[in-house]
Image: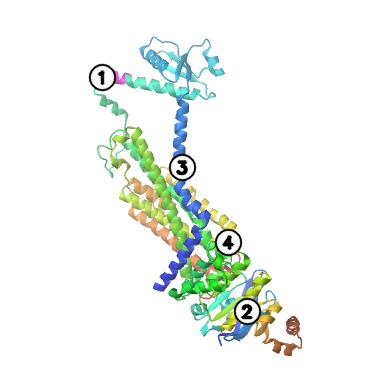
Amino acid sequence: MKEFLRRLWVVFRKEMTHCYRDPHVVIYGVLFPLLFYPAAAIAMLEIGIFQEGKRESEVYRIVFPESKEPNVAAIREMLSKSKRGKLVTSPNPDKDLKDGNIEAIVEESGGNLSVKVAGSLPLSEAAHTYISKFVESRRFKNLRKELTDKNVPLEIMRVFTFELKDSKTPKTQKEESAGGEAAHVIFRYILASVICVLVLCIPAGAVYPAICAFTEEREKKTLESTLVAPVSTECLMTGKFLSVFFVALMSGLLNLIGMSLVIWLMVSQAKELSSLSKLSGSTFSVSFETGAALVSATVLFSLLVSAIFSLLGAMTKSFKEAQNMLTVPLLIFTPMPIAGMLPGVLLSKTLAFVPVLNLILWVKAAVRGDADIVLVQIAVGETLLLVALMLFLLNRLIRTEKFVLGDQIDLWTPFFARGKTNDR
Amino acid sequence: MTVEVKDLKKMFFDPKRGEFLAVDGISFNCSQGEIVGLLGPNGAGKTTTLRMIATILRPDSGTAKVNGFEITADPQSVRKNLGFLSSETGLYERLTPREILNYFGQLSDYPLDKLEQRIEDLIKLFEMKEFADTRCERLSTGMKQKVSIARAIVHDPPVMALDEPTSGLDIITSQNTYQFIRDSKAQGKCIIFSTHIMSEAEKLCDRIGIIHRGKLFAMGTLEELRQLTGAHYLEDIFLAIVKEQVDV
C-alpha cells in the first residue's frame, strides 16, 4: 500500500507539473476564474456609472399646460424646477412630438394626468419614466400630508407592503423590516445560482487537464514508455485522474472565491448606498447547511466531470478530436443550471435521479432550508455511482490493446474490446 | 540466458483483414553482453515481438523470460529489469530531460538516494548538460533521442529492447546511438535490437534473426548465415532466406 501511494504521488506530481505548464490550463483553470468575475463586476459598475452620468446631462423638453388643479399645478411646478425637465410651449405639440422637437406632452383631463411620448425617439421613454417618478413622489407626499392632517398614524402606509412568512426559518425582528426580506430573497437567489455558474465553469477548467493527462499520452507517443515503467494500471489511472480532479476542483474553488468577492463587494456597495445598511448581518449570512451543500456539490460535480472527461480523453488520440468529444458533455451540462433555476423546479423523487441537476437542486434546497435528507442521499449516491462507473470503464479501456496500440476507439470499446494487455 | 523467448504467438484483429497472426511461434535467446538483431521489413512482427517481451502486449501463447522473470507471470519484475526504447517513443513536451529522468527513475524503483547521481551521470554520458533543464518541446530530434535513450536506461536495467532506435535520425545521431549500444554491450548488457536497415544489423549484432510475416526463419551470426545461404552481403542473405521460405 505504501509503495502504491508513493508511486501514486510520483504520477500525480508529474501530471500536475506537466498540466500546469499548459497555457490552456492556466488560462481556463486559473486566470479565467480569478479575473473574470471582478472584471465583469467592474465593467458592469462602470457601465452603470456611465449610463447614469449620461442620463444626468439629458434634458427632456416637455409641453405641460398650466392647470388650476392644485396637485397638477404642484407637479408642474416641481418639473419646471427639476434638473432634467424643461417646460416648453408649442402651438402644435403633437406635430412637435412626432418631429422630435419635444420629448413628452403632459395632458390633464378631469384631474387625471396622462403622459404622451413617441416610442421612436431615444429620449422619449426616459422622459416618461422621469415624469412618472415626479407624479409618484407627489402622490406619496399628498397621502402622507392627508394622513397627518387627519391624525392617522403613518404606519398605516405599510399595509401596502406584504411579506412571506416561512415557518421553518423564523426571521429576526430586524430582518422583517422593510426591504430586509426582499434583500434576503435576492441574496438567497444569488447563492443558489452560484452552483449553476460552477456547473458551467468547472467543466471548462477540466477539459485541458483531461486532454493533457490522457489524450496527449497517445498523441505525443509517450504512452509506451509509461506502460513499460513498473507501475500498475490502477496507480497510473488514479494518479492521472486525481490530477484532472484537482485542477477541476481548484478551478471550481477559484470560481467560488471570485464570485464570493464580487457578491461581497456588491452587497457592501448596496449597503452603503441604500437603507440596507440598517439591516442585520444575518440577512447576508450563509448558513452552515448552505455552505456545506455548496462545497460538497462542487466537490461531487468536479469528481463527476473529471471522471467523464478522463474517460473521453482516453478515448481520443488527438487534441482536436478530444476537444470535439469533450464538447458533447459540455453541451449536455449547459441546460442543467437553466432548468435548476426555474421557479418551481425543486429536488423531488424524480429529479433526484437526474445527474448534475440533482446537485443544483440540492444546493437550491439547502439555500431555501428545506433539503430532504433522503433525496440528498439519492443525489450524492447516484453521483458517486456514476463516478465509479466512469473510472471502471476507464480502467477497462486502458487495459485494452486498442488503447496501447493507438487504434481508433469507439464508445463500445470499454465494454466489448478484444485483446487485453499484459497485467495493465 | 538473460532473455529466453519460446514459441511466442500473437494474433490481431483487423476489421478489413480479419484475424491474422502478427507473430507466429518466434523463439530465440540472448545472453549477457550480446546484441541480438531482429531483421525484417515493416510489418514483419519485430515490434510486436519486442512489445510482448516488454510486457506491453500479452502473448496469445508461448512464453518469454527476462532475467529469469516470466513476462505474463511477473510483468512488474520484467519491467524493472528491462529498458525499452521504441521508435515511436515521444517525450513529455512540457517537462525537462532532468524531470523526465527523475520521473521514470522514481517509478522504476531505482534507489532514491542514488537517483540524483545516476541522472547526473546520464546527463554527462549523453552530453545533455546544455539542455538538461530545457523543456523537451524546444529540443532537436537528436537531443530528444538522447533523452529517450537515457530515459530507457535510467534504472540501469540488465536487458535492453531497442525497437528501430535510429529510425528517422540523421547520421551523426545514429552514430551516437550505435556507440551507446556498443558501450552497453561492453558493460555486459543483453540487447535485443530490431531494425530493417541491413547495414545496421551487420555492424552491430552478434547474432541476427531474419523475421518475415511473423516468423523467424533463421538465426545466427553473420558468418553462419553466409554459410547457410552462400550469399555474402546481408541483403542477399535476407532475400535468399525469405525467398526460400516463402517459396516453400
Kind of residue sitting beneath label 2: Phe
- Badge 1 vs badge 4, beta-carbon distance below 8 Å: no
Query: Where is residue B233 drawn, in percent x and y?
Result: 75, 83
Query: Tag 1: Cα neighbours inside 10 Å, few (<14), some, or many (≥20)?
Result: few
Kind of residue sitting beneath label 1: Thr
Q: Give residue A8's quadrant in the image.
A: bottom left
Q: Nearer the viewer, mark 2 or mark 1?
A: 2
Kind of residue sitting beneath label 3: Ala
Coloring basis for residues: rainbow
Disc on res. A39: 3
Disc on res. B193: 2
Q: Which region of the structure is painted magenta? A: A142-146
Instruction: Name the chain under label 3.
Output: A
* A95 to B177, vertically: above or below: above
Instruction: Name the chain under label 4.
Output: B
Query: Where is residue B189 drawn, in percent x and y?
Result: 56, 82
Quadrant (top left, top right, bottom left, bottom right) of the N terminus of chain A: bottom left
On the image, numbered disc 1 is attached to which residue? Answer: A148
In the rendered image, residue B56 lying in the magenta stretch gets the answer: no
Q: CA distance from mark 4 to mark 3?
A: 34 Å
On the image, numbered disc 4 is attached to which residue? Answer: B137
Name the residue at 43% across, 44% down: A341
